[in-house]
Amino acid sequence: MFGLSPADWAAVLLSLRVATVATAFALPCGIAVAWLLARKDFWGRVALDGLVHLPLVLPPVVTGYLLLISFGRAGPIGAFLDRYFGIVFSFRWTGAALSCGVMGFPLMVRPIRLALESIDRRIEDAAATLGAGRFLVFLTVTLPLALPGVIGGAVMCFARALGEFGATITFVSNIPGETQTLSAAIYTLMQIPGGDAAAARLVVVAVVLALAALIASEWFARRAGLRFQGE
């Protein structure tokens, strides 16, 4: 399919794996942070909001460097995780998932926060008066009503993770079969004489995957809206 070589397919499959893991682990944190920013007024709220969106304005190489000095084997967090849990991020595919999750996190939080802010609080109050606790209200009322935003945020994070390059290559390098994602493979092929055709095929794959993610996001969001909001 698409005339891809085994190495190209390895890059495509690794990108899908990395994007899926990054989105899955970022989603609970994204929902929690979005709820905090949407519903709570606390000291440092503006700072937290700025920190969440910082990867959008920082050069990706800077984000990758910060991840490297923090989560690398010699970094404070990376050394701790390696010593006590055997978890290594630097120059591993798990590090690629971490960098992709960090880069896609702001794009995930924004639509979830907007969805939470648009919910009529009186609906939640009505559920609470019927005896439901705060956590139960969140699970059965708030989260379903915000589901279109949650889906949209998850897909935006997934799509960003598929296309991530700068932070990933800085943090985990470009190792074929281990950290060489779709974007890194395209970049590598562009540096090889005669590699333009192979790079173009991977570009087509990237476009197809991105369009599929956006179409799926729209479909799931519409289904969620019909089910939970009666739209």
Image (spheres, rainbow, N blue to C red):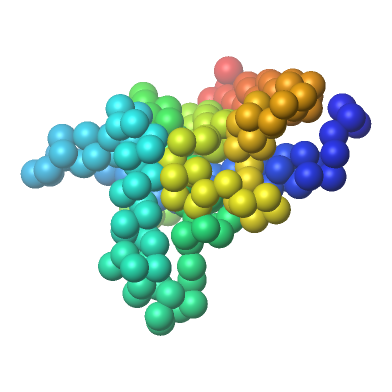
Observer-nearest of 223 and 17: 17
User: Which image quadrant is residue 125 in?
Assistant: top left
The residue under the point 16% across, 39% down is: 47
The residue under the point 40% across, 50% down is: 29
Q: The C terminus lies in which quarter of the figure?
A: top right
* Residue 190 appears in the picture as rendered: yes
The image shows residue 44 at horizontal and vertical percentages of 12, 43
The image shows residue 191 at horizontal and vertical percentages of 63, 29
The image shows residue 73 at horizontal and vertical percentages of 40, 68
Q: Residue furthest bottom?
A: 84
Observer-nearest of 160 and 4: 4
Residue 129 as seen in the image, left or right of residue 182: left
The residue under the point 22% across, 34% down is: 50
The residue under the point 42% across, 53% down is: 136
Q: Is residue 229 above or below residue 131?
A: above
The image shows residue 90 at horizontal and vertical percentages of 47, 60
User: Which image quadrant is residue 61 in?
Assistant: top left
Observer-nearest of 3 and 150: 3
Q: The N terminus lies in which quarter of the figure?
A: top right
Residue 173 as seen in the image, left or right of residue 64: right
Q: Residue furthest top?
A: 231
User: Which image quadrant is residue 31 in?
Assistant: top left
Q: Residue furthest left?
A: 43
* Residue 204 appears in the picture as rendered: no
